Amino acid sequence: MTTPAAAVGANIPVESATHLHRRLRTRDVTFRPFTTMATIAGRVAVLQDVTSGHTEQHEVDFVVVQTSSQPVRDLVSDQTRGLRIEMVGDCWAPRRLSNAIFDANRLMRNLQTAAFGVALDCLACPASEGIPPTTSVSTVSERRAQ
């Protein structure tokens, strides 16, 4: 695995990078920091050290190219048939897992406030009090439509 950066996965959040490195290293993946793929012809890739310019040829089974991530927002369209669609996480912008969790938590609290007048702490609400521990998006959407 090559990267022009000083470390493989340097831009991956720490909560994910450790697991990624463990999975790759247990599968005998070789890490090559400060390296880019200069060319590829057939099954031969030419790797180049970005600091020295030195090149090496390597036979490869496959090549995966990472490009910049862009959100695909056109999945939410007029085809929603009147349902309220909320976007969280990477459909807004590629970010950390913690950002997606925050977005989902904020959405859940907004939906609860709309449905019950208050955001509930679902973990602290025993079902015996008659307050539903969770509220699905479709339930809240249906209530708003009525």
Image: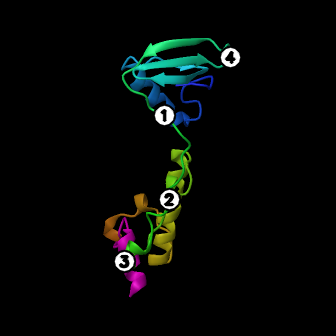
Q: Mark 3 points at which residue?
A: 81
Q: Are marks 4 and 2 in contact (CB under 8 Å)?
A: no
Residue, x 43% and y 28% (percent of image)? 63
Q: How far apart are marks 4 and 2 (CA)?
A: 39 Å
Q: Earlier in the sequence, mark 2 or mark 1?
A: 1
Q: Mark 4 points at which residue?
A: 51
User: Could you tell me the amino acid type at mark 1?
Assistant: Val
Q: Mark 2 points at which residue?
A: 88
- Looking at this rendering, what residue extends furthest in the right direction? 51
Residue 139 shows up from this direction: yes
Q: Mark 1 points at which residue?
A: 65
Q: Which of marks 4 and 1 is nearer the N terminus?
A: 4
Which secondary structure, mark 1? Answer: loop
Q: Which of marks 4 and 3 is nearer the N terminus?
A: 4
Q: Are marks 4 and 3 in contact (CB under 8 Å)?
A: no
- Looking at this rendering, what residue extends furthest in the left direction? 128
User: Could you tell me the amino acid type at mark 2?
Assistant: Val
Q: Which of marks 2 and 3 is nearer the N terminus?
A: 3
Of 122 and 40, nearer the camera is: 40
Q: What stretch is highlighted in magenta?
A: 130-146
Q: Distance between the residues labelled 4 and 1?
A: 21 Å
Q: Are marks 2 and 3 in contact (CB under 8 Å)?
A: no
Q: Earlier in the sequence, mark 3 or mark 1?
A: 1
Q: Residue 144: image x %, image y %?
A: 43, 82
Q: Which of marks 4 and 2 is nearer the N terminus?
A: 4
- Crowd tier of the residue under label 2, counting other residues whose Cα lies within 10 Å: few below 14, some 14–19, many 20 or above: some
